[in-house]
Image (tube, rainbow, N blue to C red):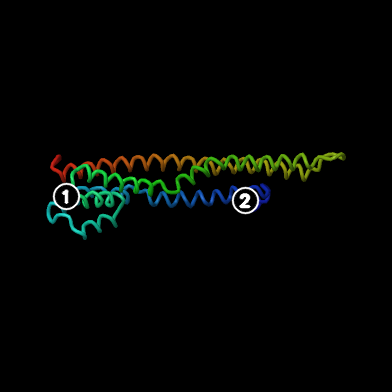
Amino acid sequence: MFTIVEAAGWPIWFLIAASVVAVALIAERLIFLRSNSIAPSGLLDETVKELKQSGVSAQMLKKLSDGSPLGRVFAAGLKNIKNPPEIMKESIEEAGRASSHEMERFLTTLGTIASISPLLGLFGTVVGMIEIFGAQNAGGSNPAELAHGISVALYNTAFGLIVAVPSMIFYRHFRAKVDSLTFEMEQQAIKLVEIVHGERK
């Protein structure tokens, strides 16, 4: 591995740094954006059951708020349970926007890495080409310097693509996951409002 890094020259360090950040962000988002931790299945039924049995309590609201983003949305709505449905929906929408923002955290950075990695690879390629032309002199070309310049050019191009492709794949995956989870949370929250106000059984 070190031999490849040495052959690729100093421009490769920018791509290595980008790859480390990308891997860390992908791992963090894979752990955070699990469906069961964002919108646990059965949470709506449990909330409605507890609501019918004992009503809204501070303990119930705290349990929901600490449990999951969907729980925080439910808690925001239940705090306004005595208000008209419009007020309850507004509080749910505000909590939903906050939860959506939390789910989208770091995705911009990951998308940026996916976009700039090929450019960093191109930068390394340009540096390699400069070294190739710099190796030319009146007495002919220096084979060792020529080979080094070609290595810098090719390794940086390849590594830039290696970093960019997985980063873009995961960025797209996470964007779709966030959209899906946001939609699911909206549907669950609407059902809760309708059940609370007797519009749904």
- Quadrant of the rendered structure where residue 56 is? bottom left
Where is residue 153 drawn, in percent x and y? Answer: 67, 41
**Which residue is at 25% across, 55% downward?**
64
Horizontally, is 112 left or right of 90 in the view? Answer: right
Nearer to me, 108 or 29? 108
Nearer to me, 115 or 94? 94
Where is residue 38 drawn, in percent x and y? Answer: 32, 49
Within-10-Å neighbours for mark 2: few <14, some 14–19, many 20+: some
| Quadrant of the image containing the C terminus | top left
Where is residue 191 drawn, in percent x and y? Answer: 21, 42
Name which residue type carries label 1. Answer: Lys
| Residue holding disc 2 | 13
Q: Are marks 1 and 2 in contact (CB under 8 Å)?
A: no
| Residue holding disc 1 | 82
Q: Secondary structure at mark 1?
A: loop
- Quadrant of the rendered structure where residue 118 is? top right
- Quadrant of the rendered structure where residue 194 is? top left
Task: Specify the label residue 56 is tagged with.
Answer: none
Q: Secondary structure at mark 2?
A: helix
Nearer the observer: mark 1 or 2; the answer is 1
Horizontally, is 182 left or right of 135 in the view? Answer: left
Horizontally, is 84 left or right of 112 in the view? Answer: left
**Which residue is at 29% across, 44% downward?**
93
Q: Is residue 118 above or below residue 73?
A: above
